[in-house]
Image: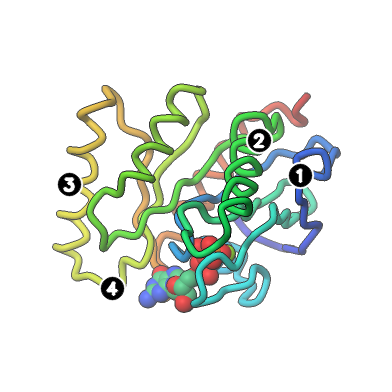
Amino acid sequence: MHISSARFRCSSTKLSQCPGDGKWEFAFIGRSNVGKSSLINLLTDTPALAKVSSTPGKTKLINHFLINDRWYIVDLPGYGYARVSKAQRRDFSQLITDYVFRREAMYFLFVLIDVRLEPQKIDLEFIDLLGQHGVPFGLVFTKCDKLSSNQVESSVARYKRTLRQHWEELPPIWCTSSEKRRGREELLDFIENCLKEAPSEQG
Ligand code: GTP
Ligand code: MG
């Protein structure tokens, strides 16, 4: 898919503030610092669109970016970031669960996983919740430039083995690197196919 325009539309602190124009949304979530904002900048080919930071917990709101005047990329707050107050942490998860489980315009959720780490409890719990709620999602392994291709392969294989303990069918999986621009075409092709199949407007 060719991206002809990508622009910031709005930040929301709650679901009711999100756009009401019925355009489909493709959302990105994962642990804090996993590379959500970097991946969004890679997909849109717009380096400063989403704010990238080495300080975890940068994205605290639901950020909507309008793509080709037709669909949205949604940058969600990271989960599992411990260095915020308990009250704030609860806010994060409320915001996340409100969006992920109740947002009718969300067509697909990309769950980002740092390819270097062994399967993390918090990610597996989140994935289980998605399954229970029937949320359509896929897994995007990030930072693949930090490992050799063999290491990436075995890390992904380990993840699949873990998932098979709970799941009969595995979700779609992509390997990406924002640094090396890997995975961009595959993700955009997937989104393009979704949009072809989707009713022109939700709701
Ligand atoms: P929060 O918004 O804080 O939850 O973080 P995020 O998930 O949006 O992560 P962000 O894109 O801000 O990236 C976090 C850090 O990881 C930054 O220092 C990025 O430069 C780095 N990073 C992100 N993607 C990659 C990648 O593919 N390769 C490498 N080597 N570094 C990456
Ligand atoms: Mg971010």
| Residue plotted at (66% across, 61% down) | 3
Hey, what amino acid is under mark 4?
A: Lys
Distance of label 4 from label 2 (alpha carbons): 33 Å
Q: Which residue has dot 4 on it? A: 146
> Which mark is drawn over residue 31?
none
Vertical side of 66 occupied by 178: above or below: below
Hey, what amino acid is under mark 1?
A: Lys
Q: Which residue has dot 2 on it? A: 98
- Residue 13 on image: x %, y %: 76, 50
Frontmost of labels 2 and 3 is 2
Q: Earlier in the sequence, mark 2 or mark 1?
A: 1
Q: Which residue has dot 1 on it? A: 14
Q: Nearer the viewer, residue 145 or 53?
A: 53
Q: Earlier in the sequence, mark 4 or mark 2?
A: 2
Secondary element type, mark 1: loop
Query: In screen coordinates, is 131 left or right of 24?
Result: left
Quadrant containing the C terminus is top right
- Residue 66 on image: x %, y %: 75, 55
Distance of label 4 from label 3 (alpha carbons): 17 Å
Hey, what amino acid is under mark 2?
A: Asp
Q: Quadrant of residue 75?
A: bottom right
Confirm if mark 4 falls within 8 A of ligand 1.
yes
Q: Which residue has dot 3 on it? A: 158
Query: In screen coordinates, is 63 left or right of 161?
Result: right
10 Å neighbourhood of mark 3: few (<14), some, or many (≥20)?
Answer: few
Vertical side of 118 occupied by 143: above or below: below
User: Mark 2 and 1 residues: CB-CB less than 8 Å, in contact?
Assistant: yes
User: Mark 4 and 2 residues: CB-CB less than 8 Å, in contact?
Assistant: no
